[in-house]
Amino acid sequence: MNSTVQKNKTWPVIFGILGVIVMILPFFSGPYIQSIGRTVITYMILAISWDMLIRSGQLSFGLAGFFGLGSYAAVLSAVNLHFNPFISIVFAALVAGLIAFLVGAVVLRLRGMYFAITTLALGEIFRIIIHNWTSLTGGPNGKLLPKLAFDGASIPTYAMMVLFALIIIALSEYFKRSRIHYALTAIRDNEIVAKSSGINIYKYLLIAFTVTAAIQGAAGAGFAQLYGFVTPESSFNANYTLIPLAMTLLGGMYSTWGPVIGAVLLGVLGEFLKLYIPYGHLVVYGIIIILVLLFMPWGIVGMAGRLLKKGESHE
Amino acid sequence: MNKKKIYTIAGISAALILSVILLIIRPTILVYGIQRAGIYAAIALPMALVLGIVHIVNLAHGEMMMVAAYLSYFICTTFGIDPLVAAIPTGIIMFFLGLIIFKTSIAHTLEAPELNQLILTFGVAMVLSQSVNLIATSQPRKISLDYVSASATIGDVSFGIYDFIFPVLAALFLAVLIYFLKKTRLGKAASAVGQNPRGARIVGINVDLTYTIIFSLASMIIGVFGSFFITKFSIFPAVGGTFTMKSFALVAMAGIGNLPMVIGASLVLGLAESLVMSVPHGAGWSPMIFFGLIIIVILSRSFRSKQ
């Protein structure tokens, strides 16, 4: 698991430019493509946030939980407190971040399987709370948004999501270049060594967990602002954990561009599959997770990096 | 060993005190609590076995139970036999399904970091639940049986007696597993592998074969339980998910590798859930109990390690 940062800087840049082109293309096509684009970007943001935490070696299955929490925070604040859509997204990020901070303070004492399963349970717990707190959340019926961001116009909402994605990509790159990255990588590689060299493991993990949960909450809020409704079953759907995971694994873990590439590839593939297999097309994502783990654990980005390195050494 | 005994005694006595209080206040809570505990113990035991010996967290655990229940359902509807009879073919099929799952995927990540194993079994779980979704649709299915609604009355308390089959089943599983691990040659080898795989390999135990057999055996137990599950509950592709989490919570509470304590942990969970359900409007909140228990276990462990 000692995937080092790639020495060669040109390839990630080329991938990045390709990604940006893919992001811009939908502006010149119809609303259907733009709606696919928004969904893909939502998954991309989730995938990047998941990757940001896995860089510390902590596997979180809590994506769907914080996603749904953010969706609800945005809709409820817009309905009850009459927040502007954009403020409601920021509010959702703050709520998700705060709850992640409180939960993380307890749960981050755990490692490995204990942490993973507790985060898996978190999503379920949030769903149950939302489901049962009928007076606030509308219970199983969910809530409707009275007014969508940009009144649901296709191009501005897509532009908003692209901007959102760019911010998250920049944040992820910042995480990769700052002190936090070295601390988190050290924790992943060898926690005891990291601890003995003076890294405050708990603090850095808590920062990473809170920030990624806030991103997931904001992604959920953005999604709720696009579709205008939340229900416990749709907002906390396990797909929001499964799909970003498959995307990150396929693209390549421990990088920003891996999740981006994975999201674009699998997002577009997923839309095609949906047309042919309306129910159960998610089986493909599960199969991708298994195949990638067994046969190419470094993902596309890692494979490309390795092939490139091989080519250089031959010259 | 001494520490373990103290925890065992503490856990059992806590469960006993809770039961006595319940017995005095409301006997039905106790009855339903024990019945629930039986379900949880029966499904958590195979996970405890796999976790204790193969050292793999199988996130597809509940999904395998769901697949077994569907298998049993289709066997029953095709051949017109009782689910309790179908438990035998279902168990055999699940033995081989477990074998296939282990050999094709999990066995290749045994040497890999724990992270990979978790993601892999999560992928397996998704493949299983989505395949069932694809083949059988998400429509709930149920087999209606007459004997399931049998009830008994003691004093002025009346309750269903069929559900006591689950505690009996759990006790049977535990007895068989303990006999297997303590008395048979293969079981002793498996225990050795569970304690120290490298040492077991050095003394000439075929570790890979042991892993395969234990995983398949656990799958078979899951299969048998799946057939019992369908007699009482309706099934749908997402039914297994919570059982994975609850089983893990129980195994974590009991301590990894401690099979008998799983029963004690299940009793605590079952009784607590039953207690919450008896409170008005409490039924919706009962699925949260296990999460609270996990958090308590975590906190107590982290404080203990600080001392």
Image: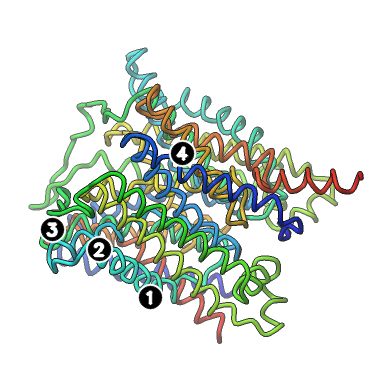
Chain of the residue that carries numbered disc 3 in the rendered image = A
With respect to residue A78, does A13 lie above or below? above
Give the amino acid at mark 1.
Answer: Leu
The CA span between labels 3 and 2 is 15 Å
Residue A73 is marked as: 2
For mark 4, give the secondary structure. helix
Question: Residue at point 27% right, 58% down?
Answer: B273
Which residue reaches farthest front? A28
Chain of the residue that carries numbered disc 2 in the rendered image = A
Is the C-beta separation of discs 4 and 1 under 8 Å?
Answer: no
The CA span between labels 2 and 4 is 26 Å
Q: Position of residue B87 (x, y in %)?
A: 42, 28
Q: Residues within 10 Å of mark 1 (few under 14, many from 20)?
A: few
Q: Position of residue B233 (x, y in %)?
A: 27, 36
The CA span between labels 4 and 1 is 33 Å
Of discs 4 and 3, which sits in the foreground? 4
The CA span between labels 3 and 1 is 24 Å
Given residues B205 and B110, the one toward you in this image is B110
Q: Are marks 3 and 2 on the same chain?
A: yes
For mark 1, give the secondary structure. helix
Of discs 4 and 1, which sits in the foreground? 4
For mark 3, give the secondary structure. helix
Q: Are marks 2 and 1 on the same chain?
A: yes
Residue bearing the label numbered 4:
A267
Given residues A33 and A52, the one toward you in this image is A33
Is the C-beta separation of discs 4 and 3 under 8 Å?
Answer: no
Question: Residue at point 62% right, 47% down?
Answer: A15
Residue bearing the label numbered 1:
A102
The CA span between labels 4 and 3 is 34 Å
The image quadrant where one finds the N terminus of chain A is bottom right
Residue bearing the label numbered 3:
A134
